[in-house]
Image (cartoon, helix red, strand yellow):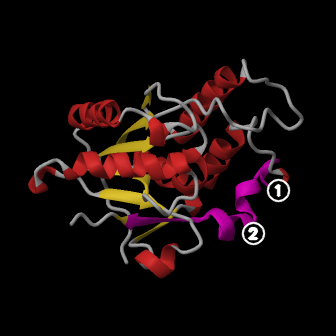
Amino acid sequence: MATFQPYQRILVILPHPDDEAFGLSGTLAKAIENGAHVTYGCLTLGEMGRTMGIPPFANRVTLPKFRQKELEESCLAIGIQDLRLLGFHDKMIEFEDQDKLDETLDALIKEVAPEVIITFYPGYSVHPDHDATGAAVVRTVGRLPANERPPVLCLAFSRNTVENIGEPDVHNDVNNFLEQKIASVLAHRSQFQIKELEGPDNWKRKEVRERFGTEHFWTYKFK
């Protein structure tokens, strides 16, 4: 078990706006305060999301614009310096042209030259887009020479995760960054309405700190 290392160039690759909020935003805010530069490659705009606001304020046509603005607000709350919208289709990552997807990720990885990549653990991330994104990342990184591969840290939360791949390799205490994390979560207002997180000083409450104060990652082990 380890803590999150002081990486200076971090590349995040996730499929949807809001994927960064719950499991990763505190870690990114903490790293950025310590001098890291973060590039976030978001594959889609979440345009097929079922939730249009609570109560609804968007529709199928306007939802992508709302979700892009929410993503930008979340990135601002975290401090992310470089947001890339990669233009793939929501709920279709597993069906995208694999060569095109991999080439897009390969070009981004080579441009950014990250010290670490953060994505979803393929097969243990519940949503097909999550799993397909993680699979594309590890497939692309796996093609690099072994001595050129950055470590890939993964988010995972399926019910059989620990049983099948073990306990997380990295635990990161982000209690000092809960203000940024909660602002990231609440930015995605078309998708969530979480009353217990709203209001001043909400990050200071014990139940919030227990629920959101530690973020966990699994290191993908290439064969």
For label 2, the residue is: 207
Q: Please report the residue visible at 40 percent of the width from the left and 67 percent of the height from the top.
A: 218
Residue sitting nearer the eye, 171 or 203: 171
Is residue 141 visible in this depiction of the protein?
A: yes
The answer to if 212 sits in the magenta stretch is yes
Left or right, residue 82 beside residue 109: right
- Where in the figure is residue 193, as x and y percent of width and height? 81, 45
Query: Based on the displayed image, in which of its 4 quarters is residue 212 positioned?
Result: bottom right
**Image mark count:** 2
Q: Which residue is mark 1?
A: 196
Q: Residue 175 vs residue 2: left or right?
A: right
Image coordinates for residue 219, horizontal then vertical, percent: 34, 65
User: How far across and down, in percent of the image, does residue 195 sit?
Assistant: 85, 51
Q: Which quarter of the image is occupied by the C terminus?
A: bottom left
Q: Are marks 2 and 1 in contact (CB under 8 Å)?
A: yes
Quadrant position of the N terminus in the picture: bottom left
Between 47 and 176, the one nearer to me in the picture? 47
Q: Position of residue 15 (x, y in %)?
A: 50, 40
- Residue bounds of the magenta highlight: 196-218
